[in-house]
Image (cartoon, rainbow, N blue to C red):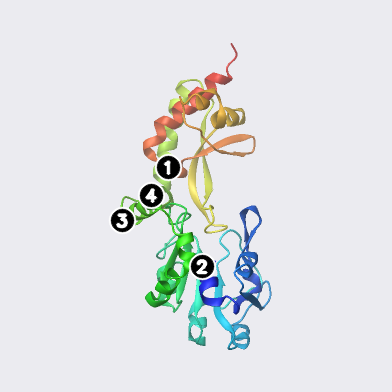
Amino acid sequence: MLAATALAAGREIIISRGELIEIGDRFRLPDLLTSTGARLKEVGTTNRTSIDDYQQAITGDTGFILKVHPSNYRVEGFTSEAAVRELAPLGVTVVHDIGSGLLAPHPLLPGEPDATTSLAHGANLVTASGDKLLGGPQAGLLLGDEPLVRRLLRHPLARALRVDKLTLAALEATVSGPLPPVARSLSADPRLLSERAERVSATLAAHHVLASVVTTQAAVGGGGAPGVTLPSAAIAVPESLAAPLRHGQAVRGGAAPAVVGRVEKGRLLLDLRSVDPADDDRLAAAVLAASAARQPG
């Protein structure tokens, strides 16, 4: 919104038809962009857009080219798109919305755009989320050419959109402190996940809770890396424990944390890739509390 207002109000934003995205709660990017007074100039088709499509659309009324990463879906098959390195030489500002906030390439996410690579390939401005794959607070990030970023920061709208000091402190801790949970989850060793699952399952079995260890695939999700799964291990418990683990008496009373798993084939799976190792005992205690609440009498 800030980029469109500062750089293209009353002008045109060139964007591929395949990148006119909608995310949660009916939030549609085209509606946001046009609300700033900018006009959208759609190029290409849903599945294929070439560099020639962009080049032919450039006029003296062009504010910038916007390239948007579809962070929560994936188009496959007969597809093509123009890369940032192709758009950069066209002589107009290129704004790249990478979505997930990934700052540098990640070996497990080869298809996910990152800010470092985008800027190196010639993007003038990169916009991203502070949460998702970056793993920090919900915030908007602006990275790019210093004069361009300063131009946006001097716009009157920037003050209305600025984040507060707590958000800035959380963002600083995310990039300079210990690894955030999302980074730890991405790098978790499947072998160690299996060992942890065996220990927790044994604890539950010792207290007569039906539990077993299953090999599974964990989805990255959360507005990044659509379709990417990672090998993982989960503890399978009866599906009937799903509700008490989420909002049972122990949870409502503060005696146990809420636990959200996923149901597959009639079992509730508690995937340890999304659980900090330090919380394994708390997880086991929560399952025991939920199981006790389900016992008659």
Query: In the image, is 25 to the left or to the right of 169?
Result: right
- Residue 193's tag is 1
Between label 3 and label 2, give the one nearer the viewer.
Answer: 2
Real-space Cα separation, disc 1 to disc 4, in angstroms: 33 Å
Real-space Cα separation, disc 3 to disc 2, in angstroms: 27 Å
Would residue 109 be seen by someone viewing this image from the given angle? Answer: no
Element at badge 3?
helix
Instruction: Classify residue 114 by image quadrant.
Output: bottom left
Q: Give the mark, 2 or 4, whose residue is nearer the N terminus.
A: 2
- The quarter of the image holding the C terminus is top right
Real-space Cα separation, disc 4 to disc 3, in angstroms: 15 Å
Q: Residues within 10 Å of mark 2 (few under 14, many from 20)?
A: some
Q: Which residue is mark 2?
A: 2
Q: Give the mark, 3 or 1, whose residue is nearer the N terminus.
A: 3
Under mark 2, the amino acid is Leu
Q: Residue 207, position in %: x, y?
A: 47, 20
